[in-house]
Image (cartoon, rainbow, N blue to C red):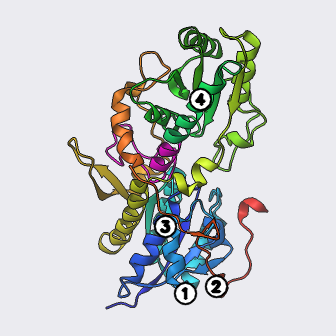
């Protein structure tokens, strides 16, 4: 039997509350299969760490710290990045690092751009005759990986937790709005999700029976600012108050956008927020009620708060990464592990595989059929799709001295065997 090969696992793109449970699954599953896997390394800050040969030894970490990855949110454990491999020198460097450390397996946790990177590395390894299995593990709070038919993947780990976050904070915001409406009749909350409406749509989970004066403005709604104001004022005339959830990607004109290496708008880094534009506009044109509109922009806390994490999401993040390890052993290179929903009224999923090429740079849009005729709400079909993902229990997060106990990995780094390297884009 051939000698076990070493492993590199890395993360890319925006973090999520459950991303580290996928990381934990890779480490624990590889530990259980010593006949296939040698040392498991983590690329510090994703592909950038691999380029710089910054590899943390995950096999040498205490088991307790690995277990604590389950309730450690975001990407602080080994880091993430938004670096795009563009130049041949970068790709050659990845191959050199993998050769130098006897890497036979590469697991990349991320979204559509990350799957493109994993696909390109798998293809390059094949062309270079490198014995490397590259496998993708899905992750994105935006839920935009895959296809609109949900045949490649039903949903991505991370989305269920952010959906739960919005279900719960909208409940809280409704209490604020109920109490303050004599002076602040309109409360505007901005949701993440770029130009994909899955996250703001989750606000409806807070009120599936539609008892709140809740308006949801997806980027796909096609409404203008003027139409938005008209809908808000119609709601004020009927209910005396309005709770507005709006996507950060709703079209309001120039916001002084900043973009990442993949060309995606970084809304929270731009000069203006959609929430501020909308609040200012509503107050300028006037409300059909006494008082003013106020705004709230929940920021990165929606993707780094473990207490709002969905227990369903935590479990699925682990199992889909575990499936990725099995795929690497049984099927070889060039696949992403995936989550598919079983038919029927009871929520059940199965874990399968899909070719990396099929999901690389994919961008699923929010289905038009799930947008209500009013363009300010989503349909019951969306509620039935999303509700099982948020779970029905709180995650169990250990506290020490009243503070959350997160994993703290020891800085045990692999010895560097290659000359220093500056990633091509940073020269």
Estimate the spatial distance between the alpha carbons at disc 4 and disc 2, rounded to whole Å: 44 Å
Q: What residue lies at 52% left-to-right and 70% top-to-bottom?
A: 69
Asked which secondary structure carries label 4, the reply is: strand
Please state the horizontal and vertical placement of residue 126, each as a whole percent of the image.
44, 70
Choose the circle earlier in sequence order: 4 or 1.
1
Estimate the spatial distance between the alpha carbons at disc 4 and disc 3, rounded to whole Å: 31 Å
Choose the circle earlier in sequence order: 4 or 3.
3
Q: Quadrant of the C terminus?
A: bottom right
Q: Which mark is residue 246?
A: 4
Nearest to viewer (mark 4 / mark 2):
4
Main SS of the magenta part reads: loop
Residue contact at pointers 1 and 2, CB within 8 angstroms: yes
Asked which secondary structure carries label 2, the reply is: loop
Q: Which mark is residue 412?
A: 2
- Residue on which disc 3 sits: 70
The image quadrant that residue 170 belongs to is top right
Q: What residue lies at 65% left-to-right and 8% top-to-bottom?
A: 288
Residue contact at pointers 3 and 2, CB within 8 angstroms: no
Please state the horizontal and vertical placement of residue 343, each as a whole percent of the image.
21, 44
Q: Residues within 10 Å of mark 1 (few under 14, many from 20)?
A: some
Residue 253 at least partly seen: no
Asked which secondary structure carries label 3, the reply is: helix
Residue contact at pointers 4 and 1, CB within 8 angstroms: no
- Residue on which disc 1 sits: 60
Choose the circle earlier in sequence order: 1 or 2.
1
């Amino acid at each position: 039997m051939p000698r076990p090969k070493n492993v590199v696992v890395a993360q890319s793109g925006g973090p999520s509350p459950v991303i580290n449970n996928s990381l934990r699954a890779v480490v624990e599953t590889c530990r259980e299969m010593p006949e296939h896997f040698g040392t498991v390394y983590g690329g510090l800050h994703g592909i950038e760490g691999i380029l710089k040969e910054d590899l943390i030894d995950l096999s040498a970490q205490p088991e307790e710290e690995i277990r604590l990855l389950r309730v450690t949110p975001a990407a602080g454990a080994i880091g993430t990045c938004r670096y795009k491999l563009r130049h041949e020198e970068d790709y050659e460097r990845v191959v050199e690092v993998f050769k130098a450390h006897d890497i036979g397996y590469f697991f990349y946790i991320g979204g559509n751009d990350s799957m493109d990177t994993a696909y390109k590395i798998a293809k390059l390894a094949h062309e270079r005759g490198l014995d490397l299995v590259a496998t993708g593990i899905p992750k994105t709070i935006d839920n935009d990986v895959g296809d609109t038919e949900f045949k490649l993947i039903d949903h991505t780990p991370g989305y269920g937790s952010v959906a739960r976050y919005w279900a719960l904070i909208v409940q809280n915001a409704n209490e604020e709005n109920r109490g303050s409406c004599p002076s602040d009749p309109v409360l505007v909350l901005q949701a993440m999700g770029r130009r994909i409406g899955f996250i703001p749509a989750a606000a409806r989970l807070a009120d599936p029976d539609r008892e709140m004066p809740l308006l949801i403005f997806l980027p796909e709604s096609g409404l203008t600012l003027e139409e938005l104001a008209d809908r808000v004022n119609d709601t004020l005339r009927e209910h005396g108050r309005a709770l507005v959830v709006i996507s950060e990607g709703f079209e309001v004109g120039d916001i002084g956008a900043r973009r990442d290496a993949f060309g995606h708008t970084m809304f929270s880094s731009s000069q203006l927020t959609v929430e501020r534009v909308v609040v200012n506009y509503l107050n300028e044109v006037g409300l059909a009620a006494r008082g003013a509109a106020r705004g709230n922009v929940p920021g990165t806390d929606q993707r780094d708060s473990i207490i709002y994490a969905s227990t369903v999401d935590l479990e699925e993040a682990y199992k889909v990464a575990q499936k990725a390890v099995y795929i690497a052993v049984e099927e070889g290179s060039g696949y992403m592990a995936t989550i598919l929903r079983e038919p029927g009224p009871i929520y059940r999923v199965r874990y399968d595989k899909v070719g990396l090429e099929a999901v690389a740079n994919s961008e699923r849009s929010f289905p038009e059929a799930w947008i209500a005729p009013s363009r300010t709400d989503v349909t019951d079909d969306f509620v039935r799709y999303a509700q099982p993902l948020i779970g029905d229990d709180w995650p169990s997060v250990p506290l020490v001295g009243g503070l959350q106990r997160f994993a703290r990995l020891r800085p045990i780094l692999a010895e560097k065997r290659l000359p220093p390297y500056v990633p091509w884009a940073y020269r």
